[in-house]
Amino acid sequence: MSAKGISLSERQIELLLAISELSTKAHRNNLRVSQGPEASNYRDRAQEYKRTKVKLEAISEEARNLEEERESLERELGSYEFQLRTSRDRLDHSSGSDYKSLPALRAEIAALESKVSQYTEEEIGVIDQLETVTKQRESLEADMKKQLQEALVAKESLEALRRDIAVVDESLQVEVAALRAQLDPEVAALLERVPAQVIDKVAYVVGQACSGCRLRISSILLDQIKRFPSDAHYCEECGRLLLPNGPRAG
């Protein structure tokens, strides 16, 4: 694709290249904010904190369930202990005339003693689990506190970088505007035809490929570039402005 009738002087080419280089630099700076080591570090710290928080919530829920189970066992145990004391009191105060009921009472006491032993063991087991879970929760709480601080430090580092790059970006935009002002109006208009998503809007021919997208240029376009080297041409794949062949085009 060509823009016939628009010739590019050496000076205009220099300006276009300078504008493209500054735009690319600004884009790379902004990529550093979103994809650079500072951004990656902050994302890692934040994700680590979130993972630990999820683990802490799960272990805290387990602790609550164990505490509820312990309280339930404690109530059951208390009930059986009360019944056992009552039955023993009845046995201690039974008279000889109650001999017929003594076997049943002793069997009742034995059953209650078994229940008390069973629930005592179960409560001890739950208490042991609760102690283990409590230690795990305390460890996770300490980890999460540390990770939160690390995430905040990483965030501040990223924010500082963003502020610094914003200053640099503003300076670059001023330079780009000054360079664009030196372009002939019809040449400046050429840049507007390049797709908005393309940052480095200027490329040149390298062998038979576009230096921007690295894709092969069609034989028809290569022929046009050869026949009209001073005209403006556009890459058919990426839409970049292709500079005419010459010392800078390689």
Image (cartoon, rainbow, N blue to C red):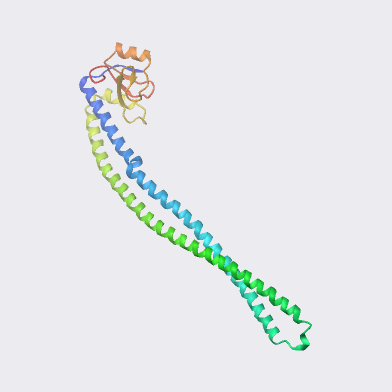
Q: Residue at x 69, y 73 (%)?
A: 111
Q: Nearer the viewer, residue 155 or 93?
A: 93
Compared across the picture, whether 5 is left or right of 86 comes to left
Q: Position of residue 12 (x, y in %)?
A: 23, 23
Indicate whether 164 appears above or below 145.
above
Q: Nearer the viewer, residue 123 or 165?
A: 123
Q: Residue at x 41, y 50 (%)?
A: 48
Q: Position of residue 74 (x, y in %)?
A: 59, 71
Q: Nearer the viewer, residue 15 or 92?
A: 92
Quarter of image, res 138: bottom left
Quarter of image, res 182: top left
Indicate whether 89 appears above or below 175.
below
Q: Position of residue 92 (x, y in %)?
A: 68, 86
The residue at the far left in this view is 11
Q: Position of residue 229 (x, y in %)?
A: 27, 14
Compared across the picture, whether 43 is left or right of 55 comes to left
Quarter of image, res 109: bottom right
Quarter of the N terminus within the rendering: top left
Compared across the picture, whether 58 is left or right of 161 comes to right
Total marks shown come to: 0
Indicate whether 182 appears above or below 51.
above
Indicate whether 127 appears above or below 160.
below
Quarter of the C terminus within the rendering: top left
Q: Residue at x 21, y 20 (%)?
A: 10
Q: Residue at x 37, y 56 (%)?
A: 146
